[in-house]
Amino acid sequence: MTEEEAWRYADELRDRVRPPEFPDRWFDVTEFGSGTQAFRAAIEACHGAGGGHVRVPPGTYPTGAIHLLSNVDLHVEAGATILFSTDPADYLPAVHTRFSAIECYNYSPFIYAYGQENIAITGAGTLDGGAGPEHWWPWVGTPEFGWRPGTPHEAADWAALQRMAERNVPVEERVFGAGHYLRPNLIQPYLCRGVLVEGVRVVRSPMWEIHPVRCENVLVRNVTIYSRGPNNDGCDPESCRSVVISGCVFDVGDDCIAIKAGRGPDGRRVGVPCEDVLIEDCDMRYRYGSVAIGTDTTGGIRNVFVRRCRWGGPGLYFGLYIKTNSVRGGFVENVFVKDIEISELTKEAVSIDLYHGDGHNGDEAPLIRNINVAGLRSDRTRSAYLLRGYPEQPLRGITIRDSSFTGVLRADVAENVEDLSVAGVTVAAAPRE
């Protein structure tokens, strides 16, 4: 795919991913009682009537898990806050989900849909996950997020889930939830078609905020996320096809956007890539990767387009961050980035690193090829780029052109790269202090 073909394809993708449409029927959640049962009853009534909108008017609405059904728009009006319970029991029974890119049964995501069509979460209201040092975050097992010696955390469960995947234990037998400590995501449509998340503000998530899995035709636009907890990725499309993320603001505790395709043995078993993803007009402010691809690349990732975004701020690490290793494997190909304003990054504007995490300790060397970056304007980075392939599996076809990097702290790195093209690039070192 050439650069000209790529941006023409991106425009076609933008036009192809259309928001779902809903009948002009409105169901006020306050007319169905209160709490989790009210949301369930309103959604079922809306779905049963042939679809429409479940209205959440101004006010605060405590609830447990909300499960969307086909042809339902959950419309959270300005001044409304859906406040999710901090009691894990309110997210049972366990549902079919993915935890860190491995399939299992676990606590329900706070807003969840499985196998539905034409669903939406819209409005100018707030989705408040209630997480913090007192609830959910301590399960990560680090004092920074509230864990204290003698209290439970997820390490044993996470190790058990990885062993189950390695042994190909049936997903139905990988049951966590009650008595376990794997944190749920905040929003997760799974095997859905026609998904819209628009306008809402998301705060205080247990971990990943918006995580569509094996979905098609996903539109996330004009969403603001502020949640600086552990593993608090902003938006993680995983093994999806046709995704547009537009006009969003990410201030989160991990990668702002992370594109994924399953992990290790489980990713190879499922074997579904993530492809055709357009990211445009977004602000990435904190904390790790602005646009990350990986670490979970096992099913393969292709056709990713990023344009007209703003990256940077105190504490934001990377710009474009392609990260994987020979344990995860898979491939990443046809990534095109242009017209990016970078104010400040702690590390590289472009990082493609096959030694991330587990490093070169497996037998599945990933293939990374046809990565094209143009029109980056950067005020401060550690270096412009870091590119590290393997001797037997170099990075292939990497282009960085027509870009300027000022305030650079150290030299660029390019190891085991075939067909590297750097043209029209200026780099100015930071002044000595």
Image (cartoon, rainbow, N blue to C red):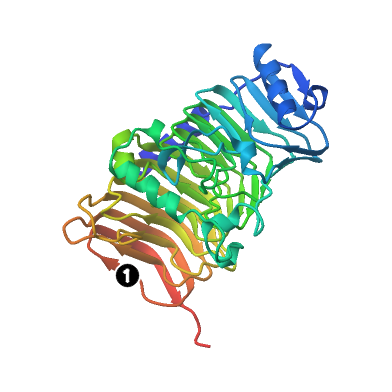
Q: Amino acid at mark 1?
A: Val
Q: Residue 259's x, y, as percent?
A: 44, 45
> In the rendered view, would you say 83 is above or below 67?
below
**Residue 383, horizontal then vertical, whole percent:** 42, 71
Secondary structure at badge 1 equals strand
Label 1 packing within 10 angstroms: few (<14), some (14-19), many (20+):
few
Can residue 359 be seen by looking at this rendering?
yes
Is residue 333 among what the camera can see?
A: no
Q: Residue furthest bottom?
A: 433
Q: State the image coordinates of residue 84 (x, y, percent, origin top left).
A: 69, 42
Image quadrant in which you'd find residue 174: top left
Q: Is residue 248 above or below residue 425?
A: above
In terms of depth relative to the viewer, which is nearer, 274 or 211?
Answer: 211
Which residue sits furthest left?
Answer: 392
Which quadrant, please, contains the N terminus? top left
Near-viewer residue (253 or 177): 177
In the rendered image, residue 25, in percent from the top left (x then y), is placed at 74, 16
At 47% from the left and 62% from the top, the residue drawn is 318
Q: Is residue 223 left or right of residue 193?
A: right
Number of callouts: 1
- Residue bearing the label numbered 1: 413
Residue at 55% across, 55% down: 139
